Amino acid sequence: MTTISFPTQPGIAEIRWTPPAKTQVNMSEWSDRRRITKFTHARWKASIALPSIVGEADFLEWRAFLLACEGRANSFRIVAVENSQNAQAAVRVNGGGQTGLALVTDGWAGAGAALKKGQLITVNDQLIGISADVAIGGGGSATLPLSRRLRISPADNTLVEVRLPTALMAMDDDDLPYAVSPAQLYGVSFACSEVFDG
């Protein structure tokens, strides 16, 4: 699998994100009680629509992208937020072997709020939500409460993207059609899901 570049012009008209959740629910026929199992390997999903693109010349970048995807074979990164969440550029994992719903980090500049509940981070190509407000502690450290478990334990000093987190995605289907009207208006929409190995 190759990671290809995601076009930026023209930008996305609409993106519908589906946060990760994967559960199994068993309901008792006698008591109506339910037993729920939550799985850790859930993936982000997105449905993307582009604005109408006028003329083939302006559509070439997107056509090249659709061809480079090779259906579901190759991946691409999509920025998961509208704007930069903060100015932090050097946040890193502080200590290897971390798993679970918290991530100890360092490299935060300044003091005060680091991230707000509901903001996102990317670590080891995993897009994860923050489940509570985070403040920067002494020495530029902060423990991040995570909405999903870490899939892979990050190594010490792994970069944590907190400004413009991305999702590593691949197409949901091998068929990637686009529409062309007689007025040379091009239209594209597609669905994609987060990818990971292991």
Image: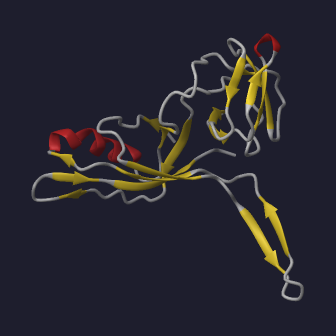
At 68% across and 19% down in the image, what residue appears? 91
Horizontal and vertical percent for residue 12? Answer: 36, 44
**Residue lying furthest front:** 112
At 62% across and 27% down in the image, what residue appears? 162
Q: Quadrant of residue 159?
A: top right
Locate residue 148 relative to residue 85 in the image: left or right. Answer: right
Horizontal and vertical percent for residue 45? Answer: 55, 53
Front-most of 9 and 135?
135
From what the image shows, is residue 184 above or below residue 94? below
Locate residue 90 relative to residue 179 in the image: left or right. Answer: right
From what the image shows, is residue 18 above or below residue 59? below
Colour mapping used in the image: secondary structure
Total marks in image = 0
From what the image shows, is residue 60 above or below residue 21? above
**Residue lying furthest right:** 31
Q: Quadrant of residue 131?
A: top right
Front-most of 134 and 35?
134
Q: Quadrant of residue 124?
A: top right
Horizontal and vertical percent for residue 170? Answer: 49, 48
Horizontal and vertical percent for residue 118? Answer: 65, 41
**Residue lying furthest left:** 183
Front-most of 118 and 158?
118
**Residue lying furthest bottom:** 30
At 40% across and 37% down in the image, what residue appears? 6
At 17% across and 52% down in the image, what residue appears? 185
